[in-house]
Image (tube, rainbow, N blue to C red):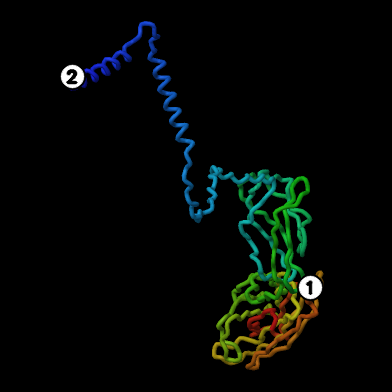
Amino acid sequence: MKGRLRTAPVLVLIFLVACNLPSAGAPTTAPDLMFTAAAQTVEAQLTASSSLSTPTLPPSLPTNTPPPVATPISTPAIPPTAPPTATQVCDKAEFIKDVTIPDGTMLSPGEAFTKTWRLKNIGACTWTTAYALVCDSGDCMSGPSAQPLAGSVAPGQIVDISVPLVAPASPGHYRGYWKLRNAAGVLFAGVYVDINVGSSGFDLYSRAPDAQWVSGAGVLPFGGPDTDNRGFVMYRSGALLENGSRPNKVLETHPQWVNDGVISGEYPAYTVVAGEHFLAKIGFMAKNDGTCGVGDAIFQLNYLEGGTLHPLGEWHETCDGSLRSVNVNLNSLAGKTVQFVLVVMANGSSGQDWAVWVNPRIEIP
């Protein structure tokens, strides 16, 4: 038994070896075929596993998903656009200032004056002598229909432009609007003149040197001397008068040293304003000792219009220690341009006829 059992394993081993030995007639398997077979085996295994049932997963819980946020699209920056350049104007002016007659200037009725404006040419065109200043509206104040420029004014230059005017005859506020006119007749650059017309008054004391003084002996100089026997006129402010006063603004008018001698003073023209009066005190100077002399004279206020002399008032005065106050209403002359005339006439002898006018004037009281 023991010998037979050892023989069986040997035979099995020999059989197995024999089965695995290569046969002479069997084809040899190429290496590529072996790799192909292996691949097919793997594929078969994957197919088999895919046929197995896959466990079902439980449904997932809802999630609060934020809504999509719009992402702004960046816009490329646009460079700023330069402002458009204004078209340059041909005729344009800039007002600089009033050279004469500032706004609201008080003038006498009928007073002649010159208004001057200072302007700058800020246009593109030269102002030539074909340009003119013309009254556009308002009160033209007797100005010219057109005042041509005196010369050319290039762009950027400054010029003074003047026009002669006359204040209206009646008191009040007046304004006149003027414009430049180019060679084509187009108006531009408005300016205006603004005045008040009223009583600036007329001071016959301060204007005495401007009057023409005469006597029977001819024309007299203003200021004396007081020894001139032709007569004389001079200031005597502060002199002792017959009433013992020593006022300012004393005008002495001594007639020619003859019986019934005369002296008169014709003043420059003045336009009377409604409501004005002639005001003064009249009388005589005292002697050195303060006593009254023997003065005896006739004082007159007259006016000249159109070469004709017209009386306004007459007062007979003697040296009696008092002065007379004179007040003459001139409303009858309102708006008229006249020349006032002061007259003193000796009433007989002219000795000691030291006749005086104290502060003679024309004003609205």
Q: Alpha carbon of mark 2 to alpha carbon of mark 1: how far?
A: 186 Å
Q: Is residue 301 left or right of 209 when viewed as pictured? A: right
Query: Residue placed at 42% from the left, 27% from the top?
Result: 42
Residue 273 lies, in percent from the top left, at: 74, 76
Q: Nearer the viewer, residue 286 or 129?
A: 129
Q: How many marks?
A: 2
Tell me if mark 1 has few (under 14), some (14-19) or many (20+) residues whose alpha carbon lies within 10 angstroms of its own: some
Which amino acid type is marked by label 1?
A: Lys
Q: Which residue in the structure is indicated by mark 2?
A: 3
What is the three-letter code of the residue carrying label 2?
Gly
Dot 1: what SS? Answer: loop
Residue shown at the point (67%, 84%) measured from the top left? 280
Residue 265: percent from left, percent from top: 70, 74
Question: In the image shown, does 68 or 240 lie closer to the viewer?
Answer: 68
Q: Residue at x 41, y 16 (%)?
A: 33
Q: Is residue 337 above or below residue 65?
A: below
Which residue: 57% across, 80% down?
237
Q: Nearer the viewer, residue 236 or 278?
A: 278
Indicate the quadrant where residue 301 lies. Answer: bottom right
Q: Which comes before the other along the chain, label 2 or label 1? A: 2
Residue 358 x, y percent position in the rendering: 63, 83
Quadrant showing the N terminus:
top left
Residue 99 in the image: state x and y as whole percent: 62, 59
Q: Which image quadrant: the C terminus?
A: bottom right
Q: Which residue is mark 1?
A: 336
Horizontal side, residue 121 vs residue 174: left or right: left
Image vertical order of residue 137 relative to residue 210, above or below:
above
